[in-house]
Image (spheres, helix red, strand yellow):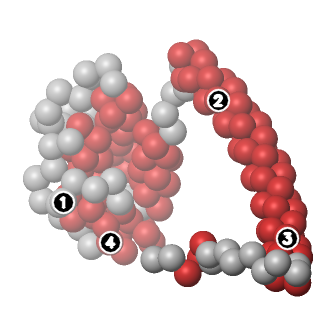
Amino acid sequence: MTAPEPQTPDASDGGPKGLAADIAQTIGTLLTQTAEMSQAAKPDDTQEIQAITDAMIRLFVGAPLRSDGQLTVKALAEEAGLRRNKLTHKHTGMKDLFYALVKTLDRPAVPAQRHAQDDDLKRRHSELWATHQQLRREASQMARVIHVLEVENRQLREQAANAPGKVHYQNVESRG
């Protein structure tokens, strides 16, 4: 009572999606065989498990027939030609398997080159932060210098206005 292998696009492309499709196919075949051997299983269970397995494989290899190709339970149910509650209530193990395989696809491998890039970005961030802090200190110092010059300018203007030989000056701010 061996279940026939599903006719799907080549799932063994060596990539993470191909690996996920291979895992789904293997587990789906085992579940189908178990359902066939179990006397409590209904004939529909075997067909549903096989349909879900085939749908998983098609979604993982990127060749959906009936759905939008998203890696969601809704798309899996559409792809399998089943109502969604079959996955959420009856075949919860298949749903959990699907979520686990999707999660492994979402987690990219971090090679050594990426670690080097991360280290380089952290170093660059530290340099930029130090430059930022230095510029803030310089801006604060320049603001103090400008304030002192404004105070001195105001004092000189007041002295010039009160001086006996009145000196006329032009207001720089009023020129336009």
Tag of residue 124: 2
Q: Residue at x 85, y 70 (%)?
A: 156
Q: CA distance from mark 4 to mark 2?
A: 49 Å
Is any part of residue 33 visible from this angle?
no
The residue labelled by disc 1 is 68
Q: CA distance from mark 3 to mark 4?
A: 84 Å
Q: Nearer the viewer, mark 2 or mark 3?
A: 3
Q: Earlier in the sequence, mark 2 or mark 3?
A: 2
SS state under label 4: helix
> Which quarter of the rendered picture does the C terminus lie within?
bottom left
Q: Nearer the viewer, mark 4 or mark 1?
A: 1
Q: Is residue 124 above or below residue 81?
A: above
* Image spot of residue 125 (x, y percent): 67, 35
Residue 157 shown left or right of residue 64 in the figure: right
The residue labelled by disc 4 is 84
Residue 170 shown left or right of residue 68 in the figure: right
Q: Residues within 10 Å of mark 4 (few under 14, many from 20)?
A: some
SS state under label 3: helix
Q: In front: 159, or 133?
A: 159
The amino acid on which the numbered mark 3 sits, given as a three-letter code, is Leu
Q: Is residue 166 above or below residue 103?
A: below
Q: CA distance from mark 4 to mark 1?
A: 15 Å
SS state under label 1: loop
Q: Residues within 10 Å of mark 3 (few under 14, many from 20)?
A: few
Is any part of residue 32 visible from this angle?
yes
* Image spot of residue 171 (x, y percent): 63, 77
